[in-house]
Amino acid sequence: MPFWLLFCCLSLFSVSLDAQEQPAPAPAGESTGTGTLTVLVDGVEGAPRDNVLAYLDINRFAGKSAPEETELRWLHANAERNIREALQPFGYYEPAIESSLNRTAGGWEARYRIQLGHPVHIAAVDVRVLGEAAQDPVFQKLLANLPLAKGQILDQPKYEQLKQNLETLATERGYFDARFAERTIEIDLQAYEAAIKLHYDTGKRYRFGDVTFKQSILSPKLLNRYPRFKPGDPYDANDLLKLQSDLGGSSYFSQIAVNASPDATTATAPVDVELTPNKKRKYSAGLGYGTDTGPRGKIKAEQRWINQQGHHYEAELQLSPIKSLLGFKYMIPGQDPITDEYAITAGYTMQNYDDQDYERIALGGSWQKQDGKWLKNYNLNLQYEDYQVGNEPRSTSLLLIPGLNWTWIDADDRLYATRGLLFGFELRGASTALLSDINFLQGILHLKWVRALNQDSRLIARGDLGATAIREDFEDLPASLRFYTGGDTSVRGYAYNKIGPTDDDGTVVGGKNLVVGSVEYEHRVWNDWSVAAFVDSGDAFDGASPEPKTGVGMGLRWRSPVGPVRIDFASGLDRPPGDAFRFSFSIGPDL
């Protein structure tokens, strides 16, 4: 056989063998990975460790299928450089790093043991604010509380945060031309020292320009009373946020956009306020149930503005088997529309409950003012009442009653407080010299205290005191002005208005004085659900000494979007008139 023919045959035979030994390709969709990659970092904790893991390229595959071995070894080879770069911002420029990459039964393990070594300390800190902000108390406070100090280990994240704080503060306070004149960190690895130089030149502070309101429903005269600043005042972004919040708190607008664009030529920031009117009228209705009132319904109508002066009104009808009312309130913004409001009111109330019956018609006016944490209300009401209590003869009364109602509230959250205090007092009276049938003076004190003991527990205490002085017989005091207690919001375990002096037939006729106290412990058991244990005690009485009735019980609480929902099961310890078992339900904010 010729040599060339023999060579060709041998070559074909070799190709055939190679084809038979080649492994079959993996079916479509089947993984060809090399197992799971585990990445371990030892010797460093906290923020430096977090930064190391963020810088490590190989850590992207931790807990996942490892890449091909060639790529894996390339990532491992770069890991030391990644670690050094990650540690430098924290003052560690020469760490000792031991690394290993090994196969395991489940894949691969990459381990990095780090010795941080000697850190770089801060030898000098030169932080200055130049320009008009050098005299700004807010910037002076920032400079007095620098996060960087001589002798500390260099922490570049704190340095970057300081830069950001300076820029944020400049923007908030109207230094729109501010810039860094110097911003350096000089590292001396021979001495392991760093020198920080940060000079921030704010330039001049801009002033507020003219304020323009874009809307069509209210007079400019009323709207111009909303801003807490005037053109020419130093710019402060918090003033703009306050303006937006105050306009949003009114009933007039559904959307508020406040924009202030700096004008470098005049160093001012004109303010444009775009206002979208609310729907002029609002109607609402609801059904509910209260253990004091039974089933109840409510219909309410509101007109959010009547004229360009911002007058508005609301009318409400409430119906229940025990007490029903029809009320109307016409409101007029005061000199400061954010805090002051005048109101004209009219109402009809009818109570038909266990021989404590009355019908009352009232006309009145009030002025309400928010003064810091105080809400102050001064009012004058003319009321006619037709009433009968127990076996007393049916009577009528006409009273002109001036009064005041002040409430002070300090709380971290009005709906669900972990720290809160409410203090309030009411004073009202009437005189026969001023269109009234009787002479009386009545005062009431309210106190409520809330304190969280820990993340899961709260202690809640409340108290009410009331006293009445009257020249005439007590029977001449209308039923709506007498003191009663018992019910969901006073002494649980007793029915509504079932504690107080009684007549010969045992009907509670109300008292001149009032004392009520309550202590409640609440403990969260799951998410927004809590259980509570409480003790209430109180009395309505005529003499100098009360005879308190006490109720104790357990309750369930749910933290709803509109305040705690309370379901209580209580027992009155003093019977009669206490109940062996009484259910009560209430909903609303803590304070």
Image: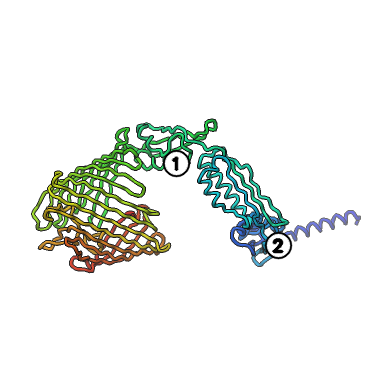
Residue 559: horizontal and vertical position, in percent?
37, 57
Which of marks 1 and 2 precedes in the sequence?
A: 2
Position of 98 with respect to 163 (left or right) is right
Against 260, residue 470 (above or below) is: below
Q: Position of residue 223 (x, y in %)?
A: 37, 35
Instruction: Residue lying at the far left in this picture: please name it.
Output: 393
Q: Position of residue 289 (x, y in %)?
A: 26, 55
Mark 2 lies on a secondary structure that is: strand
- In the figure, residue 93 lies in which quadrant? bottom right
Q: Position of residue 522 (x, y in %)?
A: 36, 63
Asked whether the beta carbons under mark 2 and mark 1 sit within 8 Å of each other, the answer is no
Which residue in the protein does label 2 denote? 96
Q: Out of 566 and 328, give the one closest to the viewer.
A: 328
Task: Identify the amino acid type marked 2.
Answer: Ala
Residue found at the far front of this picture:
135
Element marked by disc 1: helix
What crowding class fits label 2: few (fewer than 14 Cα within 10 Å), some (14-19), or many (20 or more)?
Answer: few
Q: Badge 1 is on which residue? A: 239
Quadrant in the picture for residue 216:
top left
- For marks 2 and 1, give the one nearer the viewer: 1
Please name whichever residue, 509 or 368, is drawn nearer the observer in this view of the structure. 368
